[in-house]
Amino acid sequence: MGSITDKPQYVAPSMIRHQFSNAMSCIYKAEVPLYSNLLSLVSDVNNSILERDLSLKQHLEETDQFSRLQYERHGAIRLGTASEMATMARFLSVMDMHPVGYYDLSLASLPVHATCFRTLDLDSLNKNPFRLFVSLLRPSLIPEALHSLVGGILSKRAIFSRRTLELIQIAEDQGGLSPAQVSEYISNGLETFKWTRTSTATTTEYQMLKSSSPLLADIVAFPTAHINHLTPRTLDIEAVQAGMKSYGLPMKESIEGPPGDRNCLILLRQTSFKAMEDEVLFLGDGGAGVEGRHCARFGEVEQRGAALTPKGRKLYDDLVGEARARGIGPEMTEAYAKIFARFPDSWDALRKENLAWLRYYIPESRPHGAPGPGADLDTLIAGGWVKYEPITYEDFLPLSAAGIFQSNLGREREGLKSYEPGDDSGDHGRGELVNAIGLDIHDEMVVYRDLQEKSIKECLYNFRP
Ligand code: OOG
Ligand code: NI
């Protein structure tokens, strides 16, 4: 198999990803009008922050991170079979998107596990960081009695068009796609992600699936891997949350993730609004459709902070665990923040204690004079020759993901086993997912560590004797 590279006659994979993500967003605006409102709100909030905070704006511009903000999105889909997953991985690889991280949602009583497909290096992320959270059904976690129904329906559907499959093969064989092939790739590929109101199940079958798990019904009873949400990134999630309430959007009660009232934003904070109900045509006897309803799509917004090192992540998970043990959730803002006060809150401390991943760079305006020969990193930083900034967290939080799934499946959070960080029962699940994908899953920590090390090397190289 040829590798997808930046060959000059072909469109750069990051450009295909950019076009694909924008086209997907356009379709979703038409499918889910509230998403369109959300985008306007997020863009208003982001613009007003950038107008107020000129140094933030300048920093984003200087470090090439300014333009990604306006079209930054993540999406999520749920697949039914290992073979759908394998083809999805090939489809996404054409856009330089690779599986990173393993999320075992069985820990939250959901019959799926997942990974995030995304691009890995900073240049490519800054061009367009589009990422897709892809879950896969685990038949071993659904009742035996439903196996033949589920297997029967899934074996009959084809979520990729014949032309999409051909174009994936062409991209792999020739090592890229021409501009004309990219247009076709996008228009054909998007069909896989569209919502279709015609169900692949009868009303009775749908009810059987749904009473086992609403997630199961969503995965099995429809013919496409419909996008269930597309999430824009904001610079101030509290402002968006407040705005959403006044827009009358049915918000989730609280923001998932670390507390907001901090100088140094870490990881990821998310909130969502509830699924909308779609009209559906279930299979009926003699070909006539039977009208019904299904909750498939919802809205979500997120704010992203620093990626944490294993040590930082352990501290974060420990604090989350402690809060949970004491019955304190993110919605109890003050008590929650009090527990997180033990997480250092200056970039200097986060760096010294090796809690966050950082990117080191040489600032545009450099101090007069030169450092002594062979100066080390600390000296270069102290003299202002080298600066650093947090590396953005590009992945997901299992606890938030579980909360997002649960709040949008028409089930209450209570009564469901919730995700326990640190539970390692996912080990063999991970192997199962790797087999389905047909590729190894990147360890997110290795990806961040490599970025940090590369940036240090580049800085030191510039000051070599
Ligand atoms: C995916 C939920 C995970 C997030 O932002 O944590 C997710 C799903 O509901 O299919 O998108
Ligand atoms: Ni999401």
Image (cartoon, grey):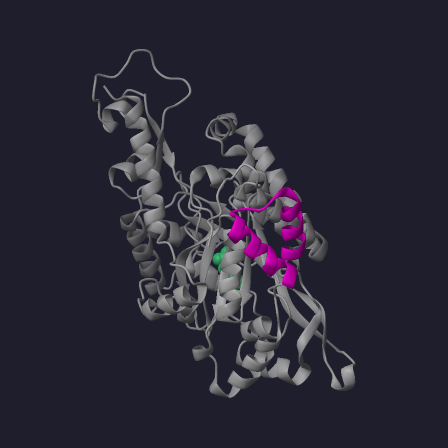
Query: Residue 115, located in which quarter of the rendered image?
Result: bottom left
Task: Write the residue at 26% across / 42% down.
Answer: 354
Q: Position of 290 compared to 363: left or right?
A: right
Query: Residue 279, located in which quarter of the rendered image?
Result: bottom right
Q: Nearer the viewer, residue 377 or 241?
A: 377
Q: Nearer the viewer, residue 253 or 236?
A: 236
Task: Write the residue at 57% across / 77% down.
Answer: 155
Q: Nearer the viewer, residue 252 or 276?
A: 276
Q: Position of 261 compared to 323: left or right?
A: right
> Measured from the top left, where is residue 23 in percent x and y?
65, 48
Q: Relative to 240, does residue 289 appear above or below in the rendering?
A: below
Q: Is residue 246 visible?
A: no
The residue furthest top is: 369
For residue 181: magenta? yes
Magenta-drawn stretch, dominant element (helix, strand or loop):
helix
Image: magenta residue range: 162-189
Q: Quadrant of the C terminus?
A: top left
> Measured from the top left, where is residue 305 in percent x and y?
43, 43
> Measured from the top left, where is residue 213 in percent x and y?
53, 77
